[in-house]
Amino acid sequence: MNREIVDSFADMVKTKGIDKDVLASILEEIFGLLVRKKYGEEAHYDVVVNMDRGDIEIYLEREIVDEVIDPNTQICIEEVNQKGNEDQLEVGEDFVEKINLASLGRRLITLAKQSLNQKIREMEKEIVYNEYKDQVGEIVVGDIYQIRKSDILINHNKNELLLPREEQIPYEKYKKGETIRAIIKEVRKSNSGPQIVVSRADNMFLRRLFEIEIPEIYDGIIDIKSIAREPGERAKVSVESQDARIDAVGACVGMKGVRIHAIVRELNNENIDVINFTDDPILLIQRALAPAKLKEIEIDETDKKAVVTADSDQVSMIVGRNGVNIRLAMKLTGYQIEVLREEKPFEEYEEDIELIDLKEELGEIVYETLINHRYDTALEVLTAGPEKLAEIESFNSDKINEIIELIKSQFEEEEEE
């Protein structure tokens, strides 16, 4: 009977990876509970579990008395003598008796199994929680097994990981069964077990990818000083080399861009700018806004503010699409950046644009009118200015300003490309 009970309990935990000594401790606790249920809370007992022999022994200790008042803690001398009394015990001494497990009844044995199951589940939850708690900030690789409206469930070593929508890379497509990489961002305790939250949008994910793809960063030769990121859109990373012989940016980009391209592909083609870090805030801002050409930078180190002056054709490059470039530069440098636009003299434009290339933007009527008045290129129109263009009868001041602004914007787009 004892062997069967131990074996049945041992089978429950074979695949759980629970230490034998821990299991023995749990069994001692559970069978102690059973003894107290049968003999009361005041009972004196000892539970001995031998996992190697597959044996459980329970010893109940009761005081020998002439007349029994509490049978759970007392036994009469006549009953002791009937049981043999090999040690010739007398009234007042303690009688220790080995209890047959079968005497506990099947109901209590079933209760023991249920209690063991519950304790194992609790232990499993704690093991999983501690395992992943120690891995927060590290990359894990799992398989997508369920795609829901607001999150994605990932299987990792038979454990469920949660990738919420806000931790996903925007517009990234996921497929059931495909392998996915993410960092463990947070591990929460809940009634149903630990909730393991992973992320692909966190800056730490980008940092870990740099460490994987760039050995110099993993080895500590190159330090990542700061990361600014808008997931799926663009990222800026400032790096610094601890070895004067190693170019930090060149090492990160790799031969023909192979290293940085591996990271870009992992991030759903997120553009990544890598710049050399410097303690000089003016130079750092200049690098963060490159390749835009800046004319002047004024900074207030106390309030962390900077005013950047640039030609009008550089402003769109500084700001970037939907303002993403300047937002990232501000996050990377820690400075609030204001941009002042200066009109660039037309003679400084490096390239001209044929008006025929702007026919669609200008419209057929405006284009034909300008051509008929001998304006063949965009610079010719800008150089003429509002006064000369006003000589064209069909153009009023609003239309002239509209034409000039449109052509200027085309030069800005050309410069940005």
Image (cartoon, grey):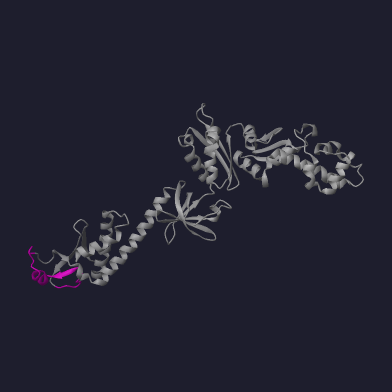
Q: Quadrant of the N terminus?
A: bottom left
> Is 399 within the magenta?
no
Which corner quadrant holds the C terminus?
top right
Residue 14 in sight from this viewpoint: yes
Which region is colored magenta? 67-88
Q: Is residue 77 magenta?
A: yes
Residue 353 locus on image (x, y percent): 77, 38
Rendering coords of residue 221 (x, y %) = 48, 32
Q: Which residue is depicted at the point 24% across and 70% down?
A: 38
Q: Nearer the viewer, residue 397 or 284?
A: 397
Q: Is residue 115 left or right of residue 166?
A: left
Q: Is residue 141 left or right of residue 38?
A: right
Q: Nearer the viewer, residue 51 or 251?
A: 251
Depth order, front residue of 365/54? 365
**Measured from the top left, where is residue 374 in percent x and y?**
87, 39
Q: How many marks?
A: 0
For residue 41, say whether it is visible: no
Q: Residue at x 18, y 67 (%)?
A: 100
Left or right, 17 with reference to 183:
left
Residue at image position (79%, 39%) is 354
* In this view, 94 is above or below 303: below
Residue extending furthest toward the top: 245
- Residue at x 63% of width, y 32% of height: 283
